[in-house]
Amino acid sequence: MISSLAVLFALALSWLAVQPIHAATAPENAGALLGRLNKLPAEQRQKQLIEKAKGEGEVSFYSSLQAQQIEPFIRVFQKRYPFIKVNPYRVSGNRQVIKIQTEMNGGNHLFDVTNGSAEQASAIKKIGAIDPYFSPQREFYNPPNRDRDGYFASLYVIPIVLGYNTNMVKRQDVPKSYEDLLQPKWKSNMFLDDEAYEWSAVLQKHLGRDKALQFMRALAKQDLRFMRGRTAQSQLLAAGERPIAIVLSGHTVLDMKARGAPVDQVILDPYYAQANKLMLARHAPHPHAAALFYDWSLSEEGQSIITSFGRVVARKGVKQRFPELVEKESFLVDVDFIGPIMDQTGKEFSQIFLGR
């Protein structure tokens, strides 16, 4: 009996050895799939992209745009491509990275396209959540608003200014340099974002590391009020909670000013702008709809909608709503600059200002 079982077992092993192995095939990454599509002639490529996007029917967009800006932005897209439903989710800052990484770790590939600051973009690339995508619209952008490897393109840029309440500070008394912020009269009178890591990095680049750290340690003694979010700070500034906010988005201040709020802005040196990058998910569940949305976002129409919000755009030939923010040349904080120093800069900022 035992020898019979042995023979049967040996025969079974022999049969298995000659059978073809059908391993589970992993879905193709979005970048590779769209890379093949990009090899087609432009007209044929667009036709195939639209046909396949129609079959997918939707696209998920994780965005750091303000809530009141996301809806009008996607509304114009859906008017042009009514067969695509855009599912937006607003998320920004470190929460954006955490959300995407948590989903990846759980094998849940939920987003197709996302946009975020250069700091967040660097972290999202580092965890392997995005793929290169050479959108045809990239040719209308100069480096560093499009990277060489195809991972990023600037959806918009954010010039950073110092904001002040015009009912509380006269124009002639506004700080004219960062050193002016150390004057005793500004103690207990300033906001600073509690994640102003890029600001810290720019100061170190332009002032030199030792001088910048010395300045920040002195500024930390000025009883700053820390909070997350430049929009929230702008609103509290207008309400008179404090007269000065050190790091604000220029377009937000000017938009509020245009609507009658008692706020204005000045540009301090070093003047810099944050690049906000558009990215394609590596495991996009709707890759063709994602490419269609990505292309449109960088198009003249998409960028015109973005600048109608007051934001500064990098696409050539688009009229800016607030041209005063681009009259002075700024240093662009892109992924190549902030990526290699992000961890160290964040730790130093937190140690100096937040005591952790």
Image (cartoon, grey):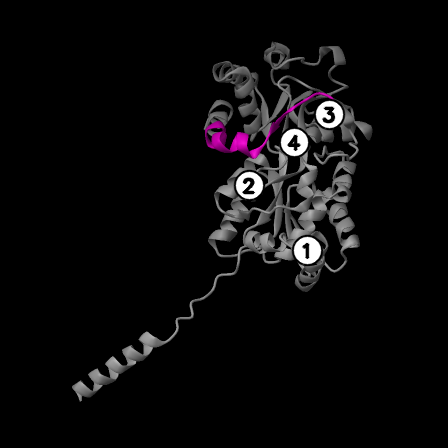
User: What is the x, y in percent for residue 166?
Assistant: 76, 19
Residue that carries the numbered disc 1 in the rendered image: 45
Circle 1 packing at 10 Å, graded few (<14), some (14-19), many (20+), is: some
- Return the disc, 4 or 1, that comes first in the chain's sequence: 1
- Number of residues whose C-alpha sits closer than 10 Å to that of mark 4, classed few (under 14), some (14–19) or many (20 or more): many
- In the rendered image, which quarter is residue 24 located in? bottom left
Q: What residue type is labelled 2?
A: Asp
3 and 1 marks in contact (CB < 8 Å): no
Residue 91, given in percent of the width and then of the height, sits at: 61, 44
Q: Is residue 343 magenta?
A: yes
Q: Amino acid under label 3?
A: Leu
Name the N-terminal-most of marks 3 and 4: 4
Instruction: Tell me residue 223's x, y (percent).
Output: 57, 19
Whole-angstrom CA distance, mark 3 to mark 4, is 17 Å
Q: Mark 4 points at which residue?
A: 230
Name the secondary structure under disc 1. Answer: helix
Do the residues bearing badges 3 and 2 touch, measured as CB atoms within 8 Å?
Answer: no
In the image, which residues are magenta?
Answer: 325-346
Residue annotated with mark 3: 325
Q: Earlier in the sequence, mark 4 or mark 2?
A: 2
